[in-house]
Structures are given as C-alpha cells and as structure tokens.
Image (tube, grey):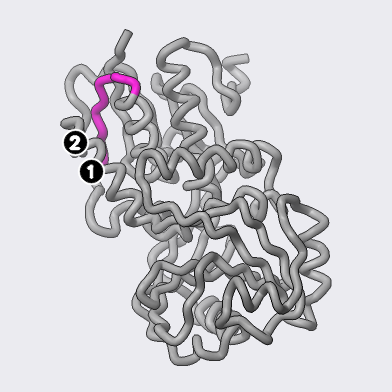
Amino acid sequence: MSAAVTILGAGVLGLATATELATRGHAVTLVDPALGPGGHGCSWWAGGMLAPFCEFESAEEPVLRHGQASIDWWDRHAGGVSRNGTLVVALGRDRAELDRFARRTQGYDVIGGNRVAELEPDLAGRFDRALFFPAEAHLDPRAALAALQAGLAGRGIGVTAGPPDDAGQVIDCRGLAARDILPELRGVRGEMLVLRCPEVTLARPVRLLHPRVPIYLVPRGEGLFMLGATMIESDRRGVVTARSVLELLSAAYALNPAFGEAEILELGAEARPAFPDNLPRIGRAAGRIYANGLYRHGYLLAPALARQLADHVETGEKPEFWHETDDQR
C-alpha cells in the first residue's frame, strides 16, 4: 500500500530518499525552503567519489559494503557515473603512507610507473609505484542532484517551501540543521576548490597521500577539477582559510606542476553532519523519522539510507542504521 511521506531537506539524502520512495509508488512531498543554486550545502560541495574501498581506510565495514552497491544505484537513477577506478599515489618521501593505506584497505592492484603512465599519461614519470582501485567510480555531484530533481519533477514532485497540512509520515533529512532535535550532531568542516587546468587531463580521481594533508583531485571534464578536502572539527561554513588554500594548491602542484597555472574558479567550505562514531543513524525524534550523520560519505551512503527508509515506511521494520535513544530502549 502506498504511503504519503513528507521529506524535510533536499540535499543528497533527501533527494535520494524521495527518489527511492517515488520509484516504489509512494506519494512524496519534498520540503526545503533554502533550495536554490548552490543551496544544497555540503551536497553541492562534495567530491563525488564513489570510492568504498579507499574510504574503508578510515571507515567502518558498512561504508565498504553499502558503498559498493551505491555505484549501480547512482547509475540507474542519475546516470553520469564514470567507472574508471581510483588511483592512489604518494611522493617518494611519503612512501610509507602508501604502505599504510594498502594495509588498511582492499580491492586494489599494486602497480608500477609504466602502468601509472598507461592510466594517466599526464602523471608519467612522476610515480614509480601506486595503488589502483579498479572497481571504484565517480560522478559530478551537481549534475547528479539535478538529475534526481529532474526525475522527481517528471513524476510531478517538486520542492516546496513548507510542508502540507496533511504531511503524512515525516522524514527529516536536514543535515546539520537538525541539531534542533539531534544534539549529538557535530560539524566536520571540508574546504574545496574548483580549478580549471586544461593542461592536465585525468580520467579518474587521484588521491595524493600525505601524513598531514592528503588531497584528492576529481576530474569534471573540460579541464575542470574538484580539489579537496580538509577535515576540520568545526561547523564553520562559507569561507576558505588561506592556510587550507596554500596546502591544497601546494599538494596539487606536487602532483603535477602544471596545476601551478590553474585558474581558481570557486572556493567553498561546508560542514558535514556527523555523529560521534561517524556512522549514519536512522531513528525517531520530535515525532518524526530522521536520517542523518552521513559524515564524508554522502554520495556513497545516501542510496543505502534511502532504501532502508523506504523499507521502513513499507514494513515498519527497523533499518540496519536504526538508533534508539536511552528513553526508547
């Protein structure tokens, strides 16, 4: 039986949940008074890496398991997924970081300089050893958000500024804005740059390991790259610090000196919502269902939470990420 569901928040989790429910035939209302160009918060500023194996280096097992399934979900509902894998490299002085990364993850091939040059000709001669994760993928987050919105619009589902009088079941996907009902949420600040550098071509995300400032570069096509990202325990948004810009650009220059001539098109800082254990939660608070705490895994875990929420709406069974507060136990 179909249900009427109102979803609060039109970032990546809200849009994915609305898409999953609408696909199953449920009546969905999507509410986000702040939605607009650049109004998606941390969803707008994400790197778009669908990299469950790389993220497993510092994440828990659910990220690896659900992250692998997310690649097909995005391909099915948004398209635009590039399945070219991920390349992980380190400068000679940081060789130990590559070994440490390899010990903490899986799903990679250890490759030499010739293979690096085959995969990324513009990195030829710069790295004699690397890790290649062939099963990983990436997408353009802004295009993916637009594709989900277009898909919902095709079903007659737009975004409204406020909930209807009869909201039905309410699912709260507001990210950090939900701290009014979820006091354990904290912000983890990420600072990113969008660069234009036509002199460099990359076919896949490249991660440059460093003991203090690891970076990633994600190709967006036509000479565009997303460069990120810092991890700072802070909920400060909007502005990027000079230190972070210097560190990120220095690392990009170390990857390929041609980035020294890159144009900086955008700088942005957003705060990712996270719980103390850095894993997402689904639960009940303030008379509604909430889903939150995607941390740095928004695009990787949003499909899994969307499916679990849809299953919960249909069956009432508690999802894997269900969290009960002390007074609910």
Q: Quadrant of the C terminus?
A: top right
- Using the image, tell me which numbered label, if any, was put on residue 237: none
> Type of residue at label 1?
Ala
Q: Foreground residue, 305 or 90?
A: 90
- In percent of the image, x 56 and y 90: which residue is there? 257
**Residue 196 pos. (x, y %):** 38, 80
> Disc 2 and disc 1: Cα gap in Å?
6 Å
Q: Foreground residue, 162 or 14?
A: 14
Figure quadrant of residue 178: top left
> Type of residue at label 2?
Gly
Side of 243 relative to 96 (left or right): left
The residue tagged with tag 2: helix, strand or loop? helix
Crowding near the residue tagged with mark 2, few <14, some 14–19, many ≥20 C-alpha atoms within 10 Å:
few
- In percent of the image, x 39 and y 77: which residue is there? 223
**Residue 41 pos. (x, y %):** 37, 54
Note whether 18 is above or below 50 in the view shown. above
Question: Which residue carries the number 1 mark?
Answer: 150
Question: Which residue carries the number 2 mark?
Answer: 154
Q: Which residues are magenta?
A: 24-32
Q: Is residue 82 magenta?
A: no
- In percent of the image, x 75 and y 51: which residue is there? 106
Figure quadrant of residue 277: top right
- In percent of the image, x 78 and y 53: which residue is there? 104
**Residue 19 pos. (x, y %):** 33, 33
Side of 241 relative to 55 (left or right): left
Figure quadrant of residue 156: top left
- Contact flag, marks 2 and 1 (Cβ < 8 Å): yes
